[in-house]
Amino acid sequence: MKIVTIIGARPQFIKAAVVSRRILSRTDMEEVLVHTGQHYDDNMSDVFFKEMGIPAPKYHLGIGGVGHGAMTGRQLEAIETVLIDEKPDILIVYGDTNSTLAGALAAAKLNIPVAHIEAGLRGFDRRVPEEVNRVVTDHVSSWLFAPTEAAVEHLRQEGIDPENVVLSGDVMYDAALVYGAEAEQKSDILDRLNLVSGDFRFCTTHRQENTDNMSRLTGIFDALRALAEEKPMVLPLHPRTRKCLQAIGRFDEMTKGITLIDPIGFFDMICMLRGASVVMTDSGGVQKEAYFHGTPVVVMRTEQTEWTELVDLGWAHMVRPDNAKALVDVAHRIEGTAGDTSTQPYGNGHAADAILDNLFEGFKGSCR
């Protein structure tokens, strides 16, 4: 069985690493990796392949740094060419990026079955590009691998055939288990930054609805500066966020006192999430990674998080990004605390095997 896998952004590299490792251990599958180039900074792409043992992509399309329409259209065209040349049996896409949507549409138009890993997640705000990407991808996919019970229910409510839906668990939990101990041995980021575990705060912010909105961007950075006056606040600066701060001419003013670093690799990220007293983020993936490593999260969004389990269990706390005071107050209240640990909402750590077993059985059945 031949699989083409589309990846293009940091969370997808992590998810693909776990699944690709399992494919390599099997004799009944081969995989061709296609990197769209959506994240083109070396620290946001190449470092993940090196650290996590992902095979080098056969194709690197180099399509990033443009608007949503241009990016999706160019990726769709390029991916279509790859699929015509490679003639895969199945296409795998992850998550909710433009790369996800472009890959799914290209395959669907060529009648190649699509497997969507991380299907069924919903934030219920169609103004958010990722929401549109994930909904459309789900509705053109043949296999929908839902990480949670809530995701399965979302797909049921949208009328998707339950025969096509699999409650697989979350491959990000697989990654936390596989790479957690290795990261502790290989990363020295706390020493490099002169940080003490439990005595610093950590933030990531990159979502377009925050970076491109002045009141939200100001609220976030007002809060970060206030918190940085008390103990180190570390921010790996995403290229989009840097560009927006520079565009308004207030970069130095808005980042004063914050410990700015370049985007970091997966092992360094694990150590930062484990060592922080609280994490502040607008990223879906980072919310969940923080939970896997036992750190409470302030979710800086106006719309509902797609990971509602984290809120229900007391690990994640939603705060409007334009309310600096609330961001600071909630960070103070929850740092160093723990939520409910009595359940496993993201499976048993064997999601990758469940996904590949289902794909192979489905493929064999279609060949009879």
Image: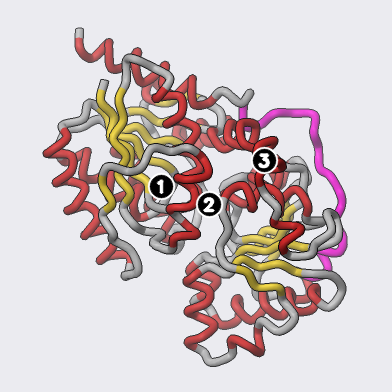
For label 2, the crowd category at 10 Å Cα-Cα, with few meaning under 14, some 14 to 19 and many 20 or more, is some
Q: Secondary structure at mark 1?
A: helix
The residue sitting at 60% across, 54% down in the picture is 304
Q: Earlier in the sequence, mark 3 or mark 2?
A: 2
Q: Secondary structure at mark 2?
A: loop
Location of mark 3 (residue): 309
Location of mark 1 (residue): 134
Left or right of 186? Residue 70 is left
For label 1, the crowd category at 10 Å Cα-Cα, with few meaning under 14, some 14 to 19 and many 20 or more, is many
Residue type at mark 1? Answer: Arg
Q: Position of residue 299 (x, y in %)?
A: 67, 58
Location of mark 2 (residue): 123
The span from disc 1 to disc 3 (Cα, nearest Å) is 19 Å
Q: Is residue 346 visible?
A: yes
Q: Nearer the viewer, residue 248 or 136?
A: 248
Q: Position of residue 21 (x, y in %)?
A: 46, 29
Q: Is residue 167 magenta?
A: no
Q: Is residue 343 magenta?
A: yes
Q: Hey, which quadrant is residue 348 in on the image?
A: top right
Q: Which residues are magenta?
A: 327-347
Marks 2 and 3: in contact by CB < 8 Å?
no
Marks 2 and 1: in contact by CB < 8 Å?
no
